[in-house]
Amino acid sequence: MTVLKDTPTRILDEAEALFAEKGYKATSLGEVADRVGIRSPSLYNHFKNKEALYQAVLDRLIALFNEPLNKMLQHPVTRSSIQEWLETIVELHYTHPNLARLLQHAALAGGPHTSVIVNQMFRPLFEHRPEGPELGFFQGNDLEPWAVMAFNNIVMSYITMAPMYREMLPVDPFSEEGLMRQKQLISQLARLVFSVGDEPTGVGIGEAG
């Protein structure tokens, strides 16, 4: 049974696709309205301007991708829980590739609310919480921010760059087998990272999984 989406959801879906395809600056509200099948003035009944629409698109994507992290941080963080979280993020990027594309445009060409992206999506990965569990790859090591950034770059750039390598790869990078191999790679890299550091666990945030 097909579920009909309401107009605001359809606007968000089409705007997300356009922002991911063209970036914030190159996307017009007229294009969004055309894709939704409504007149441009009708769009303003739901979003007051392009910036507000862009923010709504970001909010929806950030909430989706932050949910696994928030869930993990509700419990003692272990190696296994971090690896499970990483694999979940890989899967989310496969099923929702627009976030990586949108962020690439934001990084290269700019756009409003880039600080929102940093603060809501990435800062929690860098912060230590004395009152609760930490999400650390290199405990007490100056390379920790670079490790976190590298993992983000690997996962997100796969979505934006893999099509360039499709003809050279033995399987379609966006097939189920391609997804499995990407998850295996991330898991192996995580285990290598965990082996670095002064603490036996390499992360120092709960018992080893």
Image: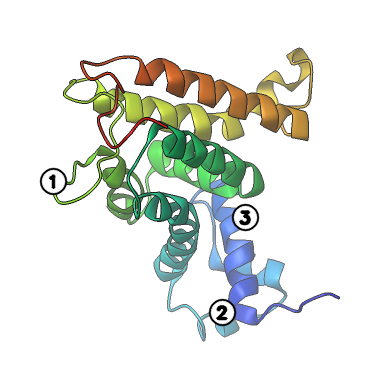
**In the orientation shown, which residue stands out farthest toward the left?**
130
- The numbered dot on residue 142 is none
**In the orientation shown, which residue stands out farthest toward the right?**
1
Q: Residue under circle 2?
A: 43
Establish if 120 lies above or below 31.
above
Establish if 202 lies above or below 92.
above
Q: Position of residue 117 (x, y in %)?
A: 35, 51
**Marks 3/1: CA distance?**
39 Å
- The numbered dot on residue 130 is 1
Q: Quadrant of residue 193?
A: top left
- Residue at figure coordinates x 48%, y 41% from the top left: 85
Nearer mark to the viewer, of 3 and 2:
3
> The disc labelled 3 sits on which kind of residue?
Ala
Q: In the rendered image, is residue 175 in sight?
A: no
Q: Residue under circle 3?
A: 17
Total marks shown come to 3
3 or 1: tag closer to the N-terminus = 3
3 or 2: tag closer to the N-terminus = 3
Q: Position of 170 compared to 144: left or right?
A: right
**Near-viewer residue (31 or 92):** 92
Q: Secondary structure at mark 2?
A: helix
- Residue at figure coordinates x 48%, y 63% from the top left: 60
Nearer mark to the viewer, of 3 and 1:
1
**Marks 3/2: CA distance?**
16 Å
Q: Quadrant of residue 181?
A: top right
- Residue at figure coordinates x 44%, y 23% from the top left: 190
Q: Secondary structure at mark 1?
A: loop
Nearer mark to the viewer, of 1 and 2:
1
